[in-house]
Amino acid sequence: MTDFKSLGLAEPLLKALAAEGYETPTPIQLQAIPLVKDGRDIIGIAQTGTGKTAAFALPILHRMLEDPRPTPKRSCRVLVLSPTRELASQICESFRAYGRFLNLSSRVVFGGVSMNNQIRDLVHGVDVLVATPGRLLDLIRNRAFRLDDLETFVLDEADQMLDMGFIHDIRRLVALLPKERQTLFFSATMANEIGKLADTLLKDPAKVAVTPVATTAERISQSVIFVDGPRKQALLHKLLEDASIERALVFARTKHGANKIAGRLMDAGHPAAAIHGNKSQAQREKALADFKAGRSRLLIATDIAARGIDVDGVTHVINFDLPNVPESYVHRIGRTARAGAEGIAISFCAGDERAYLRDIERTTRMKVPVIESPLGAGEGLVTSDRDDRPARPQQHRRPQGNGGGRNHGRPAGQGQGGQRRDERAARPGEPRRDERTPSRGPGDGRKDARPARQDRNGDRRMEDRWVRPTGAPQGERGSGLGSRRPAPRRDGR
Ligand code: AMP
């Protein structure tokens, strides 16, 4: 089997990959790394979750290491354009992680935050800049940045860029790039318009393609357990008796709820930590580090706090509370089944969350299979408001009988399209999550946390990102969630 070493990557990169725990390149990495290392332009058909960031970041870093040059003032050697701030931040983090043993600088810039700090940060230039298009154009217009020293240009999620109306910004930026450059173009689909854009940017590109993420997400086995709200904690403790739950991300709807769950787990002897907006940065970092290192098997998170959590080896996502934003469900469950692993998502549904479940099922266009509560008949089940769908017997083990393992609660074969996407905290001046639109949910007095589709500055929220429902064919993004969404405005400043 090909490993990273045989792809010819430099020693400091191999060391960083070992530190990340990556052993085997993913298919897109196997295909793209040698080509990019050789300086070829590529057109990559791949979605998030396939390992595409490392597929371009590793060979780019390798080339920079082989060809050391001074960092150009108010400019960069590598530019990665990304449609959203969250993705931009993640890409920048990946460059930092893979380049940790290299002496290279990286920065991320996006709209919605002060430009002055960004101008100051970029004065001395940067080796790798990850940016959203609108803010980068503004920096250039302010003469705070130029692109004439650029060596490599990456356009990530080109289809999303087009969907979001960034085409003109991209063309403006491309016009400022040196003609002599390497260009890497990634898109989940290759519709006509995207092909045309690629033709204008790339020179003799090599094409690399991998199976869409819908297939990746099909590896997530989903199930729902109907349970009375007060019995949820007992249900969680019961599930945790199964050792196949090696590392679980537990989602609560509120900060208070997350604290309560974590406290009760600790009282019962389950090492757990909560991560949410009321925790200090140091507390959040410690909770995450403990979870990543396996010191705590459980991390209890709210949706917002979970943004940017990128932990490999999450065997289970447990929705202690169902999210009232259906897209959050897809983002949450996408935290498991990363980079080829299998994953299990179990949701608890109380009587007053039934409308949320229906919303999720409408959005994902699939029924989440019901499994029986392991608490036993009558104990944990909602008696007054039972689901009319037949419950499958609870399955603690893989139905096809491969000897168990990470399979708690896995119902028989079902799949779910989805992508890992993070959410973003409310920004200053924006209503806090709990101050937004009133409930459209089951009338339990909770506020609906569905945020505005787009912020003032035009950077779309993660919730707005397209998620392909199961079975939606490639290239038919309009048939997915996107078709029900208001037309997005363009990324602004
Ligand atoms: P991406 O598609 O770039 O968003 O990557 C998806 C996830 O896969 C990220 O959490 C990466 O850290 C992880 N990943 C990427 N490449 C590998 C690899 N070769 N082995 C294990 N995990 C990987």
Image (spheres, rainbow, N blue to C red):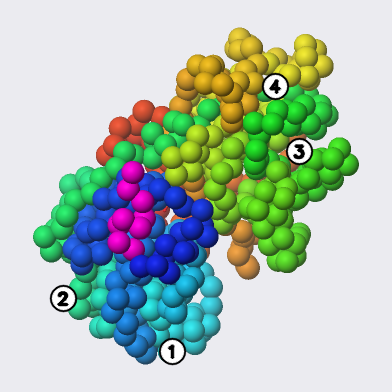
Given contact means CB atoms under 8 Å apart, are the residues at marks 3 and 1 in contact? no
Residue appearing at x 63%, y 68% in the figure: 428
Q: Is residue 134 visible?
A: no
Given contact means CB atoms under 8 Å apart, are the residues at marks 3 and 4 in contact? no
Q: Nearer the viewer, mark 3 or mark 4?
A: 4
| Label whose residue precedes the other's in the sequence (3 or 2) | 2
Tag 4: amino acid: Phe
| Label whose residue precedes the other's in the sequence (3 or 4) | 4
Coordinates of residue 302 in the picture (x, y in percent): 68, 48
Q: Which residue is tagged 1?
A: 123
Q: Is residue 4 magenta?
A: yes
- The majority secondary structure of the magenta stretch comes to loop
Q: CA distance from mark 4 to mark 2?
A: 60 Å
Q: Nearer the viewer, mark 3 or mark 1?
A: 1
Q: Specify few, some or many for label 3: CA neighbours under 10 Å numbering under 14, 14-19, or 20 or more.
A: few
Q: Nearer the viewer, residue 31 or 249?
A: 31
Coordinates of residue 344 in the picture (x, y in percent): 57, 32
Residue appearing at x 78%, y 45% in the figure: 271
* Disc 2 within 8 angstroms of ligand 1 (CB): no
* Disc 1 within 8 angstroms of ligand 1 (CB): no
Q: Which residue is tagged 4?
A: 226
Coordinates of residue 424 in the picture (x, y in percent): 57, 57
* Disc 4 within 8 angstroms of ligand 1 (CB): no
Coordinates of residue 364 in the picture (x, y in percent): 47, 31
**Marker disc for residue 179:** 2
Q: Nearer the viewer, mark 3 or mark 2?
A: 2
Q: Is residue 148 visible?
A: yes
Q: CA distance from mark 3 to mark 2?
A: 58 Å
Q: Which residues are magenta?
A: 1-9
| Label whose residue precedes the other's in the sequence (1 or 2) | 1
**Quarter of the N terminus within the rendering:** top left
**Marker disc for residue 445:** 3
